[in-house]
Image (spheres, helix red, strand yellow):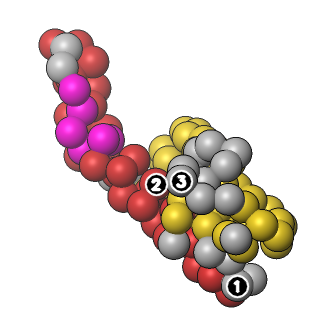
Amino acid sequence: MLVSTTDTPPGREAGTSLGVVAGEAILGVNIFRDLFAGIRDIIGGRSGGYQKALREAREHAMADMETEARALGADAVIGVDIDYEAVDTQKGAMLLVSCNGTAVKLR
């Protein structure tokens, strides 16, 4: 399945629009990752744990979006937007990644 952030699929032509499709993923962040991220904030550097968690959440959200598009009979999803949010709950932090775009049939 072709997935693109552009309004037109690269090298192809969009035909029929099948509607908006979306995927979401929420991942819990454990106490150890939070602890090491706090240390990184103090001494500087990248937080590998959070980067990995965000990457995994994005991959899950994209896969869910593609599954929804396939169910509609789409060949591609165009105009994809990816949003990242931190959700603070009483039990700790959660990472939310949402992806949405337009499912289309290609000509």
Q: Earlier in the sequence, mark 2 or mark 3?
A: 3
- x%, y% of residue 43? 16, 13
Indicate the amino acid at tag 2: Arg
Q: Earlier in the sequence, mark 3 or mark 1?
A: 3
Q: Which mark is residue 58?
A: 2
Indicate the amino acid at tag 3: Gly
Give the extent of the magenta segment. Answer: 46-51
Q: Nearer the viewer, mark 2 or mark 1?
A: 1
- Determine whether 44 is above or below 16 in the image: above
Residue 22 visible (yes or no)? no
- Residue 21 occupies quadrant: bottom right
What residue sits 70% from the left and 71% below the top? Answer: 107
User: Who is closer to the viewer here, 34 or 26?
Assistant: 26
Q: Nearer the viewer, mark 3 or mark 1?
A: 3
Q: Which residue is mark 1?
A: 73
Q: Give the structural element (helix, strand or loop) at label 2.
A: helix
User: Who is closer to the viewer here, 61 or 107?
Assistant: 107
The number of callouts visible is: 3
